[in-house]
Image: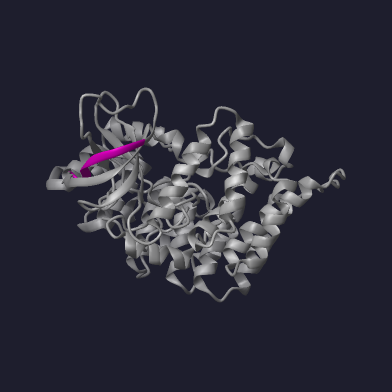
Amino acid sequence: MYDSRVTSILHCPRMNATDPERNSNRNRSHTRRFVRVTAIMAAILCGSALSACSSTGPTGDGVSDLDPTAFDTAASAAEPSTRRKSPAVTQIGREILPRAGMVVRGRTIGVSRVRGTEVARFEVDEVLRSVPWDQLPESTDAPVLTVFSGEPGMMPGAGREAIILVSRRVRSPNHDLVQVVPIEGTGGPERLHAYRRYLEIESLPREAERVAALLEYLSTAVTDSRRWTRDNAALEFGSLATARPDDLGASVVNVLRSATFRSNSSVVQRSLQKALSIAERNTSRAPPAPVAVVSRKDDLAPYVARYDAEVDAAERRLIVMEAGIDLQADAAPLLRRALDDRDERVREAAAATAGQLQITAISDALLPLLTRGEPLPVRRSTVRALGYLRATQAVPNLAILARADGVLGDDACYALGRVRSPEAVTIMGELLATAVGERRGLLEFLLSDTFVEQERALGRPLD
């Protein structure tokens, strides 16, 4: 069961796929607060972020992780000319499309659940993109895909139109869900148009053509009269500044200056200002000044200063997540402080960040959150984090929680499956002996080689 208060992915809050109107209103208020939080915490659309609705697969627990290739922190600290550059120019091209065989537009015609997995029938109206090994059957007038999602509630409700990105299952005609993009309600047409345009850009054969087409589109979109289109383009500029800074130059300086001046959102302004700074630097013909080599730990100071000065819990939450993305393990001191923040949303984000980025240095600081009466969202993210960190010292606490029903019990079972120490495996065997229904199916899966293979494929090897 999905809990919107639990950070399931560090990119942005997940949308309620069954209620696009509500999604649009909520996403306008957030307007992609997570500028640097791009990954398993950035993608580009879906109410200022298309990857807000990612899923780990048909048998996972619905916790989408940061793609380890999405942020190369060593490269991020380097000069633009030394960074490794993806041939994809858009954020979805870099982070989402490599995991999807087909991108289709259509509507859900039925949803059922099998052992905690959501199975949907999705009628396809249009194929927006496909790879040679993942095609619709040619003999069907109204093709219907069978789509598996490891997190209930990801697929749109029956009759709701959406774009879905799917990946074909091994030795099966069925598919796993990668992403959902609702296109009904306020903002839906803008999302659909933007997605189409990004797919068109990524289909161009030459990298130089893709760069030129993206800059042309963004330069127009960032001055659009529609706020969603305008903000989304600004955030894409920020993503480009991070991943492909050499692509920004004199051609976009004036439009970035104008957009920065007009924007009334601090988050969007930060994205635009970053892109503008890089574009201006690239425009200058003067050789870059020598850059002193400093320890990355020195870079934590600005985040700590912002955190200390910020009274808004939502902003502190963002600062914590940004620090984790940018500094990885060097953000541990700030994450430790955030685990004791006065606001539960900040504590929850700190736990989720530590787990998804595997910052093992704060494993010990997570344990008290399980026993001091924290709200359920904080406890869920803490349990998940301890599993990702494979914290063997947490096994006794996880064993107690795994005996309970409900989502926290499920999370604890997953955590034990990921820790996978001899003690954890023994406890899961004891739980399996008395389990019934969906919990029994879950434990059988967690003890199987299939789960081990899934975790390895997601970059979390358990051996």
| Picture coordinates of residue 265, whole percent (x, y) | 57, 68
For the point 42% across and 46% down, the residue is 388
Q: Nearer the viewer, residue 137 or 369?
A: 137
Q: Nearer the viewer, residue 307 or 312?
A: 312
Lateral position of residue 102 relative to residue 403, left or right: right
Q: In terms of image quadrants, where is residue 432?
A: top left
Residue 182 visible? The answer is yes
| Picture coordinates of residue 22, whole percent (x, y) | 33, 65
Q: In terms of image quadrants, where is residue 404?
A: bottom left
* Quarter in which the C terminus is drawn: top left
For the point 43% across and 70% down, the residue is 344
For the point 67% across and 66% down, the residue is 261
The total number of labels drawn is: 0
* Residues drawn in magenta: 115-127
* Quarter in which the N terminus is drawn: bottom left
Residue 119 belongs to magenta span: yes
Lateral position of residue 110 relative to residue 66, left or right: left
Q: Would you place residue 52 above or below residue 22 in this image? A: above
Q: Would you place residue 348 above or below residue 50 in this image? A: below
| Picture coordinates of residue 134, whole percent (x, y) | 33, 27
Q: In terms of image quadrants, where is residue 206?
A: top right
Residue 116 visible? The answer is no
| Picture coordinates of residue 320, whole percent (x, y) | 55, 61
Q: Nearer the viewer, residue 55 or 63?
A: 55
Q: Main secondary structure of the magenta part?
A: strand
Question: Which colour assignment does the render follow?
Answer: one colour
Q: Nearer the viewer, residue 291 or 245?
A: 245
Residue at the bottom extreme, as displayed: 311
Residue 151 belongs to magenta span: no
